[in-house]
């Protein structure tokens, strides 16, 4: 990556990158550690799947108000509040794990994950929507690539460090997440105020609440872009099942689990680095569909593998293809959507990108409890490929977009 690029000298972009880096790092630490604790305590794939369902539920119920809040109030202060909630969540998980997890119930962990899900629900729309307010449109596509690069850099170190810390200091790993969220909060505080840009919503009516869905439905490019992500993550989400592969299939322990969890981030990091240096992608809609098909193939290979190296390679491709699709989705949706609607539209997008991960983990866990882990993951990957091919014909306008700059209103 060429750090001499003038894009990286935008002070607000640097603050936003710092916010995303530490937040992404902490989220991955919590995700891996909670999954490990619950599976080692229960041995149940369904218990793992419930983690995803519990975190998805707040996102589902808050999808409408979260978007309105992001359009009505200063997005900076919403980011601060959400990160402070995550500080509390991390502190609770640290305290409960040290004093109660060995002899107590896992129900308090599930309960605190509801609050964790609420914070993610409210933060998502503001985080997605705020970047176009911080950088000029001419550098926006490259800024998205940089943000995704550094987010994945945090996501890469989160699982590796969490896996090592679980093995050596066990429950104190949550202290790392706590400190990271505190740094993320400070970064959010340092962002500029944006409240003067949001004056159009005076009364919150049903029409206002539903306007994000209405816009997505009417814009077929945005609809196709978002919907294909639902397909990918609902049927090919495998992150929640990694403790099963680490313990029961590959026999590599918590350190190996950290490596497994980090490998998609390594792939995503390499893809983000490449995207940040390449010119804008031609025919981005087509590349989006191709990347989802590759994503599905990588899922199938991982599910069938009993070799650590094949599994790591599949996860690398899994993460790289996901980064390509995520980069294209974010650019398309944010450039097509007008600023006064971006919070509500990005609320829908946030639930799809974040909520479908958790819902996909639940789908995988539930399916694994019925037909076994390997068949559940394999059939999910095959379904992803099949539906991606259908998208090629279902949304012809998406594949006909020739250049990302054509989307810039």
Image (cartoon, helix red, strand yellow):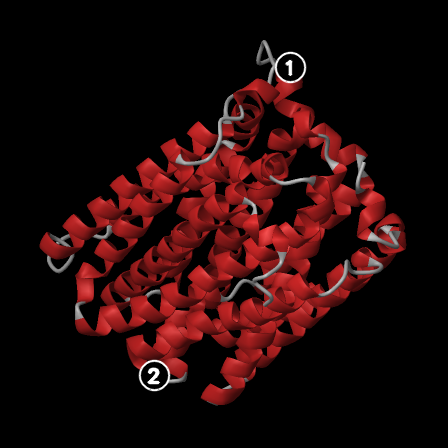
Residue 33 quadrant? bottom left
> Which residue is pictured at 61% across the width and 14% down the height?
199
Nearer to the camera, 22 or 29: 22
> Which residue is pictured at 19% across the width and 66% down the height?
170
Q: Residue 227, relative to residue 370: is it above or below?
A: above
Coordinates of residue 165 in the picture (x, y in percent): 24, 69
Residue 39 quadrant? bottom left
Disc 2 crowd rating (10 Å Cα; few below 14, some 14-19, many 20+) is some
> Which residue is pictured at 21% across the width and 46% down the height?
91
For mark 2, give the secondary structure. loop
Q: Residue 273, relative to residue 285: is it above or below?
A: below
Nearer to the camera, 298 or 384: 298
Q: Name the residue beneath numbered marker 1.
A: 200
Disc 1 crowd rating (10 Å Cα; few below 14, some 14-19, many 20+) is few
Toward the top, the furthest residue is 203
Q: Which mark is residue 252?
A: 2
Coordinates of residue 81 in the picture (x, y in percent): 37, 31
Coordinates of residue 215 in the picture (x, y in percent): 74, 30
Q: CA distance from mark 1 to mark 2?
A: 55 Å
Q: Is residue 61 visible?
A: yes
- Position of the N terminus by quadrant: bottom right
Select label 1 or label 2 by which is in front: 1
Q: Using residue 286 as the reference point, say whether residue 113 is left or right of it.
A: left
Coordinates of residue 220 in the picture (x, y in percent): 81, 41
Q: Which mark is residue 337?
A: none
């Amino acid at each position: 990556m060429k750090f001499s690029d003038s894009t990286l000298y935008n002070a607000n972009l640097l603050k936003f990158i710092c916010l995303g880096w530490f937040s992404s790092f902490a989220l991955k630490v919590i995700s891996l550690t909670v999954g490990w604790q619950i599976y080692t305590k229960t041995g149940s794939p369904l218990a793992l799947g419930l983690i995803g369902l519990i975190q998805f539920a707040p996102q589902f119920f808050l999808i409408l108000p979260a978007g309105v809040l992001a359009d009505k109030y200063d997005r900076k202060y919403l980011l601060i509040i959400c990160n402070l909630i995550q500080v509390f969540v991390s502190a609770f998980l640290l305290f409960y794990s040290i004093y109660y997890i060995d002899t107590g119930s896992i129900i308090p962990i599930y309960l605190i994950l509801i609050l964790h899900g609420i914070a993610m629900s409210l933060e998502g729309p503001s985080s997605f929507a705020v970047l176009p307010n911080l950088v000029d449109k001419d550098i926006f596509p490259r800024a998205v690539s940089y943000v995704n690069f550094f987010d994945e850099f945090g996501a890469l170190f989160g699982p590796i460090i969490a896996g090592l810390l679980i093995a050596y200091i066990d429950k104190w790993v949550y202290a790392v997440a706590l400190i990271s969220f505190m740094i993320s909060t400070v970064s959010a505080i340092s962002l500029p105020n944006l409240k003067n840009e949001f004056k159009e919503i005076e009364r919150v009516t049903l029409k206002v609440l539903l306007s994000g869905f209405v816009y997505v439905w009417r814009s077929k490019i945005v609809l196709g872009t978002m919907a294909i992500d639902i397909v990918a993550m609902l049927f090919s989400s495998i992150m929640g099942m990694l403790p099963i592969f680490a313990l029961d299939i590959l026999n590599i322990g918590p350190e190996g689990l950290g490596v497994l969890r980090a490998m998609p981030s390594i792939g995503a990091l390499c893809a983000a680095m490449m995207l940040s240096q390449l010119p804008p992608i031609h025919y981005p809609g087509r590349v989006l569909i191709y990347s989802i098909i590759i994503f599905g193939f990588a899922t199938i290979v991982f599910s069938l593998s009993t070799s650590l190296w094949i599994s790591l390679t599949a996860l690398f491709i899994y993460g790289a293809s996901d980064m390509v699709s995520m980069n294209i989705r974010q650019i398309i949706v944010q450039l097509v959507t007008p600023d006064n609607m971006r919070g509500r539209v990005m609320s829908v997008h946030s639930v799809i990108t974040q909520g479908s991960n958790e819902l996909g983990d639940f789908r995988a866990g539930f399916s694994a409890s019925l037909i076994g882990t390997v068949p559940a993951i394999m059939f999910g990957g095959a379904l992803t490929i099949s539906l991606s091919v259908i998208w090629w014909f279902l949304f012809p306008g998406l594949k006909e977009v020739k250049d990302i700059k054509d989307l810039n209103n």
